[in-house]
Image: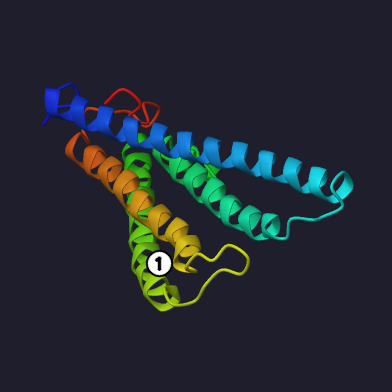
Amino acid sequence: MTPDSPLSRRVDQALGLVRSLCLLVASLCLVVLVVSFGWLVFGRYVLNATPTWVEQLALLLICYIAFLGAAAGVHEDTHIGVALFRDMMPEKLRKIVMIFTDLALAAFGAAMLAAGITLMRFGWDTMLPMLNLPESVRTAAITSLGALMFLFAGIRALQRILHFRSWTPADHFEDV
């Protein structure tokens, strides 16, 4: 599988679609968050009846906004990192460090996925106050981030390993 092979392009297109879906859902959650706070202000100051469910909904939505946004950041390779020392290394060592970073992110994502599944099983019978939804709806955000981190970083690591000789660290596999 070469960087410009049809399979490689299809995998990148599919991952880009998943990333776009993450950003779309996070954006919709942000819109719902803003509208619900508008309703909170209207209810409190105009109707003199504060909707109590808004706070719980806001906590739930913020989980999805943050975790889906973080997953998109892993796909775009914009996660927090200190590149100073890596960039000072010789090119071959820099490539190895980038592969190791992707593998570490994928392992962390797999651990989050496993822990998230455990949390979802544990919280299925507990309801979120005011929303009457299972607590697992909130922990599904953590679980989805773990799965997406594992997917995005794992595939990027695999691509970098398969194309070790043909890429430069500056490429970051945006077009692979």
What's the residue type where badge 1 is placed?
Gly
Query: For the C terminus, which image quadrant?
Result: top left
Q: Is residue 99 left or right of residue 73?
A: left
* Mark 1 Cα shell of 10 Å, populated few (<14), some (14-19), many (≥20): many
Q: In this view, does 137 lie to the left or right of 65?
A: left
Q: Is mark 1 on a helix, strand or loop?
A: helix
User: Is residue 77 or residue 28 the one in the foreground?
Assistant: 28
Q: In this view, does 79 lie above or below 114?
A: above
Q: Where is residue 137 in the image (x, y as percent from the top left)?
A: 46, 61
Q: In this view, does 66 lie to the left or right of 162?
A: right
Query: For the N terminus, which image quadrant?
Result: top left
Q: Residue at x 34, y 30 (%)?
A: 16
Q: Which residue is drawn at 45% across and 75% down?
A: 123
Q: Which residue is drawn at 47% across and 64% down?
A: 139
User: Is residue 172 or residue 127 the one in the foreground?
Assistant: 127
Q: Which residue is drawn at 33% across and 61% down?
A: 110
Q: Position of residue 18 (x, y in %)?
A: 34, 37
Q: In this view, does 97 lie above or below 143?
A: above
Q: In this view, does 37 lie to the left or right of 1?
A: right
Which residue in the protein does label 1 denote?
Answer: 116
Q: Position of residue 87 (x, y in %)?
A: 48, 37
